[in-house]
Image (tube, rainbow, N blue to C red):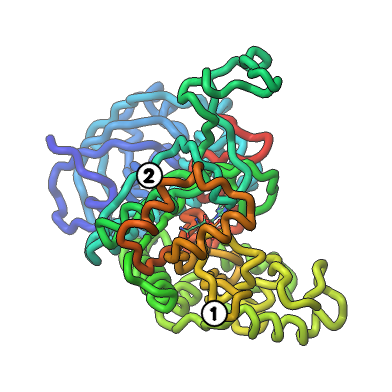
Amino acid sequence: MKRSSVKELLHSDKFLQEIHVKGWVRTFRSNRFIALNDGSTINNIQCVVDFENTNEELLKRITTSAAVSITGTLIESEGKGQKVEIKVSNLEILGDSNPDEYPIQPKKHSLEFLRENAHLRIRTNTFSAVMRVRSTLSFAVHKYFQENGFNYVNTPIITGSDAEGAGEMFHVTNFEANQAPLNEQGNIDYSKDFFGKETNLTVSGQLEAETYAMALGKVYTFGPTFRAENSNTTRHLAEFWMIEPEVAFNDLDANMDLSEDFIKSVLTYVIENCKDDLAFLDNRLAQEEKSKPQAERSEMGLLEKLNFVANNNFKRVSYTEAFDILRNSKPNKKKKFQFPVNEWGVDLQSEHERYLVEKHFKSPVILFDYPAKIKAFYMRLNDDGKTVRAMDVLFPGIGEMVGGSQREERLDVLKAKMAELNIEEEELWWYLDTRKFGTAIHSGFGLGFERLVLFTTGMSNIRDVIPFPRTPQNAEF
Ligand code: 4AD
Ligand code: MG
């Protein structure tokens, strides 16, 4: 008999027909009622066992997390809380689970405990909901770009250029530690290494994506990126997934439009296609909020917040305007910021970004035209000579969701900037070629996928929205 998913059965009204389903026992109560889940939905289907006519040994093996195969009849449920249930005619244990050893009990566990059991935490409602939303978001990302004429580009994970300056890199080498050959100067001789040069894990696919945008017009990457910063925060991972569109002939305004339209579009898709999971996560967040002091509670529920962002314009504010707002803000005057905002040109810290989005604007904000000194070498210099066409999209509860810019397309200006920062032209000869042969204005941005999942699911730690998080001192699994 064809096997149905729990999701299909819960939506079915073809009663009294024989059905077949496989899954894992979530709970078994009164020796009668199995709550069965197979991952297809957050909801369980109730399977009713005729315990009087079932062998006692078999009943004992129906424990939380046992894998079972069931055939039976789909009937309208008489019990509360569900529309349909299964009257079990045959039950087979596919895999036993010893209830004394199984760590995930049907009760509330702390997220810290579940993180240590990342291989099993996916069996909880919270994590299965988060990961289904994550999967749907990935699909929505590809759907958006594919439907808008973008080509998906796979940029290299191992890279020989480290000029991006986006963060500390992980070295990739085939040398044994302490046995690396040295050159005459006593430095490691990478010419003898696997690639014949020093290589690293990429921090961003942008520079390579730019070369592709100069031929394919509109491209995007969606892949893993790596940063070896020792940032132990709820917003940083050492391995995370980044989405980087790059578009020829787009200026910064078009780039801001793209980022806003893209984010709204994927959120709308998830709101429409993950109703059950989002309803669960909305409720979960509401419970969490209740345990916080009144002043710290968020003003909106999860769904309300997602709909708000999907349906309202992001505020667009220049760095200079934001600087003025921050300098004159209460926390700055009362010296409440850890990093005071006094001089134009200071880099904005996450406390400033959060003040702007959470307290001042109460909405996502796109900051643009940053001081050149605090941004990367490839950003286009404005006519004022001191700001660049950079943009960051800041989100409530998250801080920086997107970082991007219009790129410097003028060869002489780009070269001068590289010289100023001691970036060797030889190292980026291929990048400079794009400015020599048919250069054109172009723009792009990078969105940290886990930060988007964090916002969408209302979780508060980035380690809880990627299956197996990589952070300093932690690479289990
Ligand atoms: O602002 P970033 O460093 O920008 C770049 O890498 C550019 N090359 C992107 C581009 O223009 N194509 O990183 C982009 C985004 C950040 O806004 C943030 O959302 C995310 O990547 N991000 C991280 N996410 C998780 N953990 C980390 N350690 C992250 N570092 C950056
Ligand atoms: Mg950034």
- Residue 425 horizontal side relative to residue 77, left or right: right
Q: Is residue 279 visible?
A: no
Residue 155 image label: 2
Q: Residues within 10 Å of mark 2 (few under 14, many from 20)?
A: many
Element assignment for label 1: loop
Q: Is residue 370 above or below residue 58?
A: below
In the picture, residue 443 is in which quadrant? bottom left
Give the residue drawn at x 73%, y 81%.
326
* Amino acid type at mark 2: Thr
Give the residue drawn at x 50%, y 52%.
126
Instruction: Return the residue nearer the eye: 442 or 33.
Output: 442
The outermost residue toward the right is 334
Give the residue drawn at x 52%, y 22%.
191
Q: Is residue 93 above or below residue 18?
A: above
The spot of residue 130 in percent (x, y) is: 46, 53
Where the C terminus falls, by quadrant?
Answer: top right
* Amino acid type at mark 1: Asp
Q: Please name the residue that numbered disc 1 is placed on.
A: 383
The spot of residue 473 in percent (x, y) is: 68, 34
Where the N terminus falls, by quadrant?
Answer: top left
* Pointer 1 with pointer 2, Cβ within 8 A: no
